Amino acid sequence: MTALRFGVVGREAGQIRLEVCDDTQQATIQPEVEQKTEPTTTLYTDESNAYNRVAGTGRGHGTVCHSQKEWARDDDGDGIREVHCNTMEGIWTGLRNFLRPFRGVHKKTWLSMWPCLSGLIISNGSLLTS
């Protein structure tokens, strides 16, 4: 069974928050959004119904519709496609690739270590130096 997960990444701050969740229902996701983001945050997500109440918290919310083959969008006309969730999807890919050799390792344990490890990899270029 695949571990259900929730994550946020600050594009400017570079901070990552990851959680293993029981489900991806709105009642589960909404408190996580409110706890892990500032009220002035703009969230960029896919079209999941779990995020339908984000705007009601005062946070901005932009979505891409993957089912319509939309991966990124430029909403303000500056030529930069700022509405996307590729940053978070890339983090999940990195985590999955990192965990692949550790079959059977408890995902919550490794999930809690990944933000630290990815920060070391980004800042040093590699995790281990010779």
Image (spheres, helix red, strand yellow):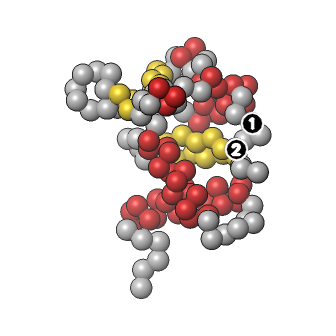
Q: Tell me which label, 1 or 2, sits earlier in the chain.
A: 2
Residue furthest bottom as drawn? 130
Find the distance from the CA under tag 1 to the CA under tag 2.
6 Å
Q: Answer left or right for 61 relative to 79.
A: right
Instruction: Name the residue: 42% across, 29% down.
Output: 70
Instruction: Name the residue: 61% across, 65% down.
Output: 100
Quadrant of res 5 = top right
Looking at the picture, how far across and down is residue 125, in whole percent? 37, 68
Name the amino acid type tagged 1: Asp
Is disc 2 placed on a helix, strand or loop? Answer: loop
Name the amino acid type tagged 2: Leu
Looking at the picture, how far across and down is residue 120, in whole percent? 46, 64
Instruction: Name the residue: 70% across, 33% down.
Output: 24
User: Mark 1 = which residue?
Assistant: 23
Assess disc 1: are there few (<14), some (14-19) or many (≥20) residues with their C-alpha within 10 Å of its C-alpha. few
> Is residue 9 in view?
yes
Q: Which mark is residue 4?
A: 2
Assess disc 2: are there few (<14), some (14-19) or many (≥20) residues with their C-alpha within 10 Å of its C-alpha. few
Is disc 1 placed on a helix, strand or loop? Answer: loop
Residue 67 or 94: which is nearer the viewer?
67
Vertical relation: 7 (above or below) 103: above
Residue furthest left as drawn? 78
